[in-house]
Amino acid sequence: MNEYISFLIFLFFVFFTFFLVELFSSTVKNKILGYKEISEGKLEPYESGMLYKDSPYKRYGVRVFPFLLLFLLFDIEAALLFPFIFEAKKFGIFATIELILFLFILFIGYFYILRKRGLDL
């Protein structure tokens, strides 16, 4: 039980020392590097110093969302191919046939989307 109390006291001093060092360093950094004047531009959402001309809550057209979903779908499919490509020799001929079938189905879906003009905005 004595060891636990000494460990807890040590832990308290470590956190207390860390708190003091962090408090001191943050105040010193703010005094040396901090801004002296805050303009209206700095209070804008992007903090670039330039005034924002439009509303920050801009609406997107509904036609954009199917395009984004298709991009996400094909992006995930491409990400699933990378582990297989790097380890193709370990999997053998059956996995290679599976990969060709997967790519064939993926291209059929891609050409179907092109035919239905799903990528046109």
Image (cartoon, rainbow, N blue to C red):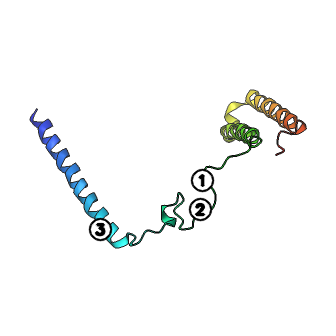
Q: From the viewer's perspective, is residue 104 above or below residue 52?
A: above
Counting from the top left corner in percent of width and height, residue 102 is at 78, 31
In primary-sequence order, the first of circles 3 and 1 is 3
| Quadrant in which residue 88 is drawn | top right
Q: Quadrant of the N terminus?
A: top left
Q: Residue furthest top?
A: 94
23 and 104: which is toward the camera:
23
Q: Residue at x 37, y 71 (%)?
A: 33
Please name which of the two marks, 3 or 1, marks the residue nearer to the observer: 1
Q: From the viewer's perspective, is residue 40 above or below residue 18?
A: below
Separation of disc 2 and disc 1 at Cα?
Answer: 8 Å
Neighbour tally class for label 2: few under 14, some 14-19, many 20 plus, Cα within 10 Å: few
Q: Are marks 2 and 1 in contact (CB under 8 Å)?
A: yes
In primary-sequence order, the first of circles 2 and 3 is 3
Label 3 sits on a secondary structure element that is helix
Q: Amino acid at mark 3?
A: Val
Please name which of the two marks, 2 or 3, marks the residue nearer to the observer: 2
Which residue is denoted by mark 1 in the rendering? Answer: 56
Neighbour tally class for label 3: few under 14, some 14-19, many 20 plus, Cα within 10 Å: few
Label 2 sits on a secondary structure element that is loop
Counting from the top left corner in percent of width and height, residue 119 is at 82, 42
Q: Disc number at residue 106?
A: none
| Quadrant in which residue 87 is drawn | top right
Q: Disc number at residue 28?
A: 3
Q: Amino acid at mark 2?
A: Tyr
Separation of disc 2 and disc 3 at Cα?
Answer: 32 Å
Which residue is denoted by mark 2 in the rendering? Answer: 52
Q: Amino acid at mark 1?
A: Pro
Query: Is residue 35 shown left or right of residue 88?
Result: left
Q: Residue furthest left?
A: 2
